Amino acid sequence: GINLGPFSQVPSIWELPRSTWESSQVQGLRGSKIPAADSTVAPSTWDLPPRFHQPGTFLRDSINLGAFPKHTGNAPDSRGSGLQFPVVVSWGIIRAMDRVDSDRASAEACLAAALHPRTPEARGLVGPGVEPSAWLDLLPGHRVAGLVAAALDSAGLVSDLSPQEMLRLQRLVMDDQRQRAVLDAALELAGRALESAGLGYVLLKGAALGRMVYEEPYLRPMSDVDILVREDEVEGCLAALGGAGFQLPDERDISFWREAYYNLPMVAPGETEVVVELHWSIAQERQRPDVDGLFDRSRVLPGENGSFRVFSLPDLLLHQALHHAYHFFQPRLSWILDLALLHLERPSLAETSARAAGWGMKVPLALSCLQVEKVFPGVIAKEWHGWAESVSRARWMLRLAESDHPIELLRGWRGRRRQLIYAFAMLDRPGQALMGLAGWAGRTLRFGDREGHERLANKQQ
């Protein structure tokens, strides 16, 4: 793990035993470097970012804690953005009903400032008048305990915590280490089973990001493992994983997941219950990513204990933005930081925006860029920021419904009715709404419920 000054005085609490962490089962691919994705990306682009190479330089400089700019919408309208929506009244209701918890917002603003990839400032987390328990309570939900510990260490502020606060932070970091180790072990078991059966797969989300843009995998905690396989190989993958000891859903549930969604969960063998999700797409009916193209453009990520395939930089950025949009830009700092770090790798705007248009996700991508700029000012390149504000639907959504909260993007994003408004407004084209409605109607007629997760959690045999 990283050197955290006084934290290193409590190794039995702070970190897993070195022999355990470095074992083949949990090591994963620590310190791997990612090769250039194609000729348009410089060979050094996918190297681990220099800011992560040395403890003490991980976070530095300063930031204006109040620097959360509103989007003025001065950029020109986008061309061919599709339909405009008569939802001004709905936006007005959303603005009137949404309220911000000021204490929580202040704590989250301080966390965001401490985690800023370019100009971090951790002094807002400690000192006179600051109650660290306010932000310590938020770390599990935002999944940034290790990053906050590193930020405090780099700023020389760890000693400003009380012994009880230090111990609590240490335990949160160790929880992330343990969880990541167990999840990586499940991933390696799944990978060996699929490779033995001659089946290909690509790492998704945290499984890929922890190895690509973070110094240590545990600095990017996960709740499960996500991998992508080809749709025509799903049955073979299920057979291979079942043979390796994974607990598969029953046939009825598999039928539900195959028709209702684009992934299905299974439980890895072992004492700790770990979920591995098998994806055959990365999007719902509303968007149309080219899965074959995702495989063709994927690259090998080498490591000490083997190699994995990961998306190209534009594809990874698009997937993270789309995933975040499906959660209505939930203000989880680890998700926003993922996108910020990917933007620091300078993905091609021309390639990424063209692919977003082809997939039907220009609006989600633009909103994603604007949330990153709101939470971490200065991270988004000027050309990207200009493009995002040129997408008229995204610009108008923020004019009418941007949250006053320092890290939230949209007002009232938790409410189901508001989510439906936002989901409709984020569609690039009218046909996407028809596809989504048809898919929902078909699932309801066949399975008789709206939420697959709810049905599986309360299923009746």
Image (cartoon, rainbow, N blue to C red):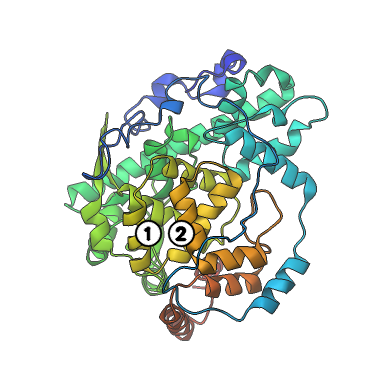
Q: In the drawing, what numbered circle is on residue 138?
A: none
Q: CA distance from mark 2 to mark 1?
A: 8 Å
Which residue is at the far left? 198
**N-term-proximal mark, 2 vs 1:** 1
**Label 2 residue SS:** helix
What residue is shown at x 69% (from left), y 35% (from top)? 136
Q: x, y (%) of residue 282?
A: 37, 61
On the image, numbered disc 1 is attached to which residue? Answer: 353
Q: x, y (%) of residue 178?
A: 49, 33
Q: x, y (%) of residue 210?
A: 42, 38
In the picture, measured across the screen, residue 400 lies left or right of residue 385, that is right
Instruction: Please count the marks in the image.
Output: 2
The amino acid sitting under disc 2 is Leu
Q: Residues within 10 Å of mark 1 (few under 14, many from 20)?
A: many
Q: Are marks 2 and 1 in contact (CB under 8 Å)?
A: yes
What residue is shown at x 55% (from left), y 31% (from top)? 146
**Label 1 residue SS:** helix
Q: From this viewpoint, is residue 323 visible?
A: no
Q: Residues within 10 Å of mark 2 (few under 14, many from 20)?
A: many
What residue is shown at x 40% (from left), y 51% (from top)? 317
Q: From this viewpoint, is residue 195 visible?
A: yes
Q: x, y (%) of residue 10?
A: 59, 16
On the image, numbered disc 2 is attached to which residue? Answer: 365
Which residue is at the far right? 129
